[in-house]
Image (cartoon, rainbow, N blue to C red):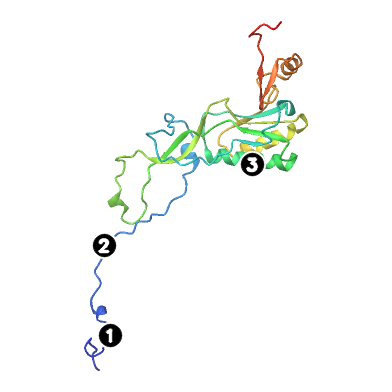
């Protein structure tokens, strides 16, 4: 048996004879974790925490579109309105608002066509949700500080709603009322807690009941203002 050495065998790399230095570094998983479930942020426990110059690094809300359908429809075109009203004081995440908008919009497009309604999301997510990230990996106990400095970093956004506050409103023609109710019923499954569906007595998105609206319109007291109307009061210069 003939022992090999770097001198005896020029093809044998001399670097292999040196042992690699032993490292004692801990492996830290830096991959992003999923969102916390919304049940962690359901209740209005703290003060409102909006985005400001002090609260920076807030992610954009998932919901970016608050009006869908034929939003430029005149006031006279859609007299019937149905509201989805919250029956609890709670927080609705921006993700839930977006999911409800998509569900409501999809059903109305399928049932009546894309130009047969106007959806308006009435709740806006301004409240910033925080998370105190904890490391869950090998050697994390050496790096974590527990409850020291536990004020979390912004994670998402939510809308704070009260009992009786309208979440979604939809306007359409009288013949489409049953589709509006069904669309809002499907949208309500995207929210926690309890919601109620109301068929409004008012004309469209205006503040006048249908009888008042017809009377004021016949008297020439109303002028169109987008999806609303303006009332012409008895003031100003006296006309001859």
**Front residue (pair 2, 87):** 2
State the residue lying farthest toward the right: 175
Query: How far is the residue under mark 2 from the one under mark 3?
Result: 52 Å
Residue 46 location, quadrant = top left
Q: Is residue 56 above or below residue 174?
A: below
| Residue picked out by circle 2 | 24
All told, the count of numbered labels is 3
Disc nearer the start of the sequence (2/1): 1
Left or right placement of residue 37 versus residue 214 in this view: left
Q: Position of residue 25 (x, y in %)?
A: 28, 60
Q: Mark 2, mark 1: which one is toward the viewer?
A: 1
Left or right placement of residue 194 versus residue 175 in this view: left
Quarter the N terminus occupies: bottom left
Residue 45 location, quadrant = top left
Left or right placement of residue 106 versus residue 31 in this view: right
Query: How far is the residue under mark 1 from the one under mark 3?
Result: 69 Å
Q: Position of residue 75 (x, y in %)?
A: 70, 26
């Amino acid at each position: 048996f003939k022992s090999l050495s770097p001198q005896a065998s020029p093809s044998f790399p001399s670097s292999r004879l040196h042992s690699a230095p032993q490292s004692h570094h801990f492996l830290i998983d830096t991959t992003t974790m999923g969102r916390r479930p919304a049940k962690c942020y359901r209740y209005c426990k703290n003060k409102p925490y909006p985005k400001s110059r002090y609260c920076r690094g807030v992610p954009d809300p998932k919901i970016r579109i608050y009006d869908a359908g034929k939003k430029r429809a005149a006031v006279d075109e859609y007299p019937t309105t149905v509201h989805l009203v919250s029956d609890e004081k709670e927080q609705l995440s921006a993700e839930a608002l977006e999911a409800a908008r998509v569900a409501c919009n999809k059903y109305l497009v399928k049932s009546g066509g894309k130009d047969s309604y106007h959806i308006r999301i009435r709740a806006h997510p301004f409240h910033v949700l925080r998370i105190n990230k904890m490391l869950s990996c090998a050697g994390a106990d050496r790096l974590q500080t527990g409850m020291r400095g536990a004020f979390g970093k912004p994670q998402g956004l939510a809308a704070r709603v009260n009992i009786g506050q309208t979440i979604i409103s939809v306007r359409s023609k009288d013949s489409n009322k049953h589709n509006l109710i069904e669309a809002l019923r499907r949208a309500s499954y995207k929210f926690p807690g309890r919601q109620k569906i109301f068929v409004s007595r008012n004309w469209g998105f205006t503040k006048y009941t249908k009888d008042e609206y017809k009377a004021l319109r016949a008297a020439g007291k109303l002028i169109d203002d987008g999806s609303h109307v303006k009332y012409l009061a008895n003031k100003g210069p006296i006309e001859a």
